[in-house]
Structures are given as C-alpha cells and as structure tokens.
Amino acid sequence: MDVATREGQVMNREVANDSLTAQQVPGEGVRAAFTRRFSPTSAVSVKELVTPGGAGVTVLFGASGSGKTTVLRCLAGLERPDEGTIRFQGSVWSDARRGVFMAPQKRRVGFVPQDYALFPHLTVERNISYGTHDLPAGQRQKQVTKMVAWLGLEGLEKRFPHELSGGQQQRVSLARAVACRPRLLLLDEPLSALDAPARGRLRVELRQLLIALGMPTFLVTHDRDEALSLGDQLVVMDCGLVLQQGPVQEVFSRPSSIAVAGAVAVETVQRGRVVAVEAGLAHLEVNGVGLTSVCGPEIHSGDTVFACVRAEDVVLIKEDRVMASARNRLVGKVSGMDKDGFMVRVHIECGFSLTALLTQQACAELNLTVNGDILALIKAPQIHLIPHAESR
C-alpha cells in the first residue's frame, strides 16, 4: 500500500469520526407503530417496528407498492401518520392521538431520494454545501471539504450533475445528506437508477461507505441481492403491512409465513405432513417422499407444514457419494434449466418440484441435460418448516 493510499484511508476514518461521532446514541433506535391511510381501502400499517440503537442498516424490503417508501417518508416527516406513534432514540417524532408531529427539519434526518434529486444548476461543491445550511457559517466550507475527501470526490467539485456518472451522482447525494450531521440516514432505492453492472459494483462501495459512516440507516429496496449485501436488519413488507423483521440472513433463511417466503423468493415451498418428531428432528412426508428437517418445539407429529428450501442449499451430484451430513437424498430428473446471469436455476422432479442454483461451470461438469437423472442432497438444517396455521 502506498503512502498516499494509506493517508487517504486515515483521513477518511478521521472525517467519519470527526463529523459523525456526536450522533451516536446507545440504546433503542426507532420504535414505531403507525398507520398512514390514503383511502378507506388503502393504507400502510406498521404494527411494530423496532431497531437497535447505534449504527446499522435496516432494509425495508418488498415488491413495488408494498409500502416501503411510505414508511421511509413517515420516518422523514414527509408523510404524517393518521394513527400511532414514531419515536427515535427516545424522542417523540409523531403521536397522532396527542396531535404531536415534529417537522422534518427538526428531526435531523438525511434523505437520499431514488433519483438523487441533485440541483442541476449547482456544482458538486454547492450541492453538498446546500446540506450544510443549518451549520454555522464558519463550519460550512470545512464540512464540504470533509465530505468531498470522505467520498473521494476530489477534482469534481466544480462539475455539474450532468457531467457525473451515476455512481458519482450517488456519492454527491449521499454527501449532501450526511453533511448536515443527521441523526438518521434514509436511502430510497439508492441503486435503482443505475444499470446492472454499476449496481453490482456500487453495492460493495455503498456498504463500505455506510460502515464507515457509523450512523443508523434505513434503506428501501426490492432487490434481494441489495438486501443481502447492504443490510444488517431486514423488514419485509407486503400490501402495506410489515410481515417480519430480524437479522437479514435469519429472515431470508427462516421466513415466518408463506407470505414472507414468497416475498423473499424461497424457490421451493412444499406442503407436507409431519410423521414423527424426535431429538429435534422432524420426519415428514411431502407428496409421498420422506424428508428430515431440524425443527423447533412448535412442530409436532401429525402437523401439516410447509417445507421451505432455498435453491442455493440444494447440492446436485451424479452418483451417491458419501455425505454423512446430508440426511436427504432425493433421486430425480432434471425438468428444466434457466439461466440467471452467471448462474443456472435447475428444476428437478423428485416426487415434488425442487429448484437448485448452480454455476454454469458446475452444470457443465455434471453434464446436466433436461430429462437426465440426478441426485439432490439437502442437509436437515437447510429445510425450514412453517406450521400450516401460521401461514394463513
């Protein structure tokens, strides 16, 4: 590593620490339960939204129209809930029953809209400076300089938005939002305006920036890869309702209902019956095929359940080699193969429909062909069971 690079990294850490450390408040982050009504039949309802205090990225995840942006706008103060409360780090931002509603500028949030919303007639420097208007005059230029250095925008200060790439525009918008030293950062589909190659590249960069920032952040996306790459906590929304929240990997791997399994795109969801439960394992039957899964105390013999398996957890082999940890060995035939970028989704009929996700190279090495025989292996912990009663 050369001296210039090392000095730049040190400066970036100093910028982040000097600018933002004052915003860190331990304990609880957001605690909200509210409803925003748009008509008698259309509303966004949050029964309970709780995030830990301190830094971390909470992803609001779901399909378009699920209510994610409305929740973000309610947190920002751009929408006023009709019922319920919103609190942040102990401060009441909104309480409909008591008629309390804190104005957006008093909440001290940084907001990065989907299209970045940079002022086209202002340079990079002046766009960022706009976010510092609440700071004392003597600190404004100092803060702009820090933001430029932190986000690697040196040399672009005098350029206008139309002279920047999508990634550069994103960083300018983020710099403007952070320059005012907000208590909470809100990002609405921050990568949606970029093409696919740029999104993949900038996901990594944005995650690194958010870690360096060390600020509580809410991020809206409907993209599974973005949620997995950027988030610490995941809030799944559908039809205006919050369905499940928790650590990202936990929610994706262990959806609490069929609706959540659909929202996080679990590829295989099959209805089955539990035949027996012993030693923390459930033995079940799915369309006449026996499966074994790890289960919790809520699963009992005789229960009807939904067995969920993510495609990346299915291993395909041509012959039955010894794999002591794979309790489930399913003989089947390849029914279809669909390319998904550099990956291939392999559809298998093994008494029920099962999907596996492989690299193109793995498919070639296995010489996979439609109607060809295959053996699918699934470890017991990789099968997640949803009790039928909870899936309604």
Image (spheres, helix red, strand yellow):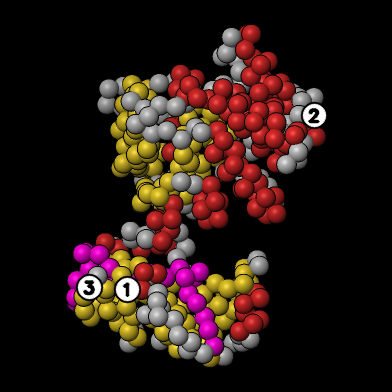
- Magenta span covers which residues? 295-318
What amino acid type is highlighted by mark number 1? Ser
The numbered disc on residue 279 is 3
User: Residue 150 or 94: which is nearer the viewer?
Assistant: 150
Task: Give the residue type that dot 2 points to.
Answer: Gly
Distance of mark 1 from mark 2, alpha carbons? 57 Å
Q: Residue 293's mark? A: 1
Q: CA distance from mark 2 to mark 3?
A: 64 Å
**In the rendered structure, which amino acid carries the disc numbered 3?**
Ala
In contact (CB < 8 Å): disc 2 and disc 3: no
Answer whether residue 226 is magenta in the image.
no
Q: Which residue is mark 2?
A: 155
Q: Residues within 10 Å of mark 3 (few under 14, many from 20)?
A: few
The image quadrant where one finds the C terminus is bottom left
Q: Secondary structure at mark 2?
A: loop
- Give residue 23's position: percent from left, percent from top: 47, 24
Q: Secondary structure at mark 1?
A: strand
Give above or below for 150 relative to 50.
Answer: above
The reply to whether residue 188 is in sight is yes
Instruction: Name the residue: 37% across, 49% down.
Output: 246
Q: Secondary structure at mark 3?
A: loop
